Image (cartoon, rainbow, N blue to C red):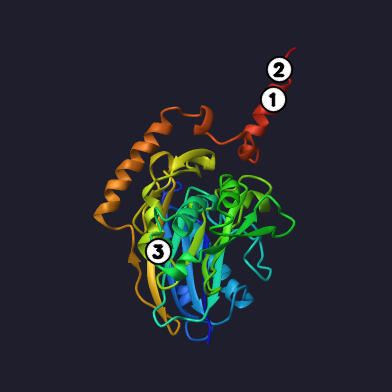
Amino acid sequence: MKTTLSVIKADVGSIAGHIKPSDALINAVKDCVKQRVGNLITDFYVGSTGDDVAILFCHNNGTGCEELHKLAWDAFIAGTNKAKEQGLYGAGQDLLSDAFSGNVKGLGPAVAEMEFEERRAEPFLLFTADKTDPGAYNLPLYLGFSDPMHCAGLILSPKIGKGFKFVVMDVEHVESDRTIELNTPEDLYDLAALLRDNERFVVSAIYSRATGEQATVASTTRLHNIAGKYTGKDDPVMIIRCQGDFPATGEILSPYSIGHYVAGFMRGSHTGPLMPVKMGSIISYFDGPPIVSAAGFCVHNGKLTEPVDCFDHPYWDYIRNKVSRKAVAIREQGFSGPAMLDYKELEYGGIVETMKRLEDKFSQ
Ligand code: MG
């Protein structure tokens, strides 16, 4: 029987601003999901990254299962109710609709799902990021799957060396899913040409060319495309199967040592370096910096191991210090130039009013 991993994530309220969901909120989500172990799902995990709660479901219902999406929706409603009860900030923030309608995709929560035949050993990573958007994974995926400077397996393993198929989505095309498939290594430069634009082109999936097996699935939701206005950043989730015919876990993690600059940070309107953090980390400096955590699991017969916190190692303390310096470096120039996002990215927020007001005051 095939196993499906579905991660569904939302910000439904947090303590003291955009800092962290309360324990009571997280428990409300867990309690709701727990009741369905054995009749809809085989196992689950609930965790938080910054102000977001992510639910990882393990089940046999395939991707896009309405009943499963309904369970996620109900769990986030339970979390929202707890958030309201406690007076948390942004209660129900990411639930952009009043009612569930078949699939949480398009209703606010971020979704990534993958169905596969379990290997004898099935290691995978769950990435959850906060204060950034789906394009944040573009560079680490490019490097982890197609650059031998990070993925030594491209040289050392004949199967990995056959390369990967990247599926890239144009997230500005809101009418339907508009995607392109590019094969590495031969399409590398075309892939780079698209992935340089993190706000428009986003890796949605990656497949092994040696086996056809799916290695990666990532969320592609851009909330402003749903709500038509700024409602929060689109903090992305991603699942990556590792080892065997896929890159090793350490090869996937390696590019996060860069702390590359991404969109997000304060009010989702700035540029900041992506900091690899421990699971459950809070948001702090300038409502950031943008953070990413990686929970490692094995799944067997639909049952998950406990998660291992992949960025909880002394090496990453050194990287976090480096990323902090990068955060300070760009923050020193405040709103000027590349420190703040393009007007195009801000046009869902309040600056539109300011620009309209000033327009009338120009003379020529
Ligand atoms: Mg968030």
- Identify the residue position indicated by label 2 in the image: 361
Name the amino acid type tagged 2: Lys
- On whether ligand 1 comes within 8 Å of the CB at mark 2, the answer is no
Mark 2 and mark 3: span between their CA atoms?
Answer: 60 Å
Visible residue check, residue 31: yes
Residue 301 screen position, x and y as percent: 44, 85
Q: Secondary structure at mark 2?
A: loop
Q: Residue at x 39, y 38 (%)?
A: 327
In depth, the one of 319 and 165 nearer the eye is 165
In the image, residue 350 above or below residue 294: above
Crowding around mark 1 (Cα neighbors within 10 Å: few <14, some 14 to 19, many 20+) is: few
- Identify the residue position indicated by label 3 in the image: 153
In depth, the one of 223 and 147 nearer the eye is 147
Q: Residue at x 41, y 68 (%)?
A: 157
Visible residue check, residue 29: no
Mark 2 and mark 1: span between their CA atoms?
Answer: 7 Å
Mark 1 and mark 3: span between their CA atoms?
Answer: 56 Å
In depth, the one of 188 and 267 nearer the eye is 188
In the image, residue 39 above or below residue 15: below
Residue 24 screen position, x and y as percent: 41, 63
Residue 16 screen position, x and y as percent: 42, 47
In depth, the one of 211 and 234 nearer the eye is 211
Between disc 2 and disc 3, the foreground one is: 3
As drawn, the residue found furthest toward the left would be: 314
Residue 337 screen position, x and y as percent: 53, 28
Any mark on residue 357, and which? 1
The quadrant in which residue 246 appears is: bottom left
Which tag, 1 or 3, sits closer to the chain's start?
3
Name the amino acid type tagged 3: Gly
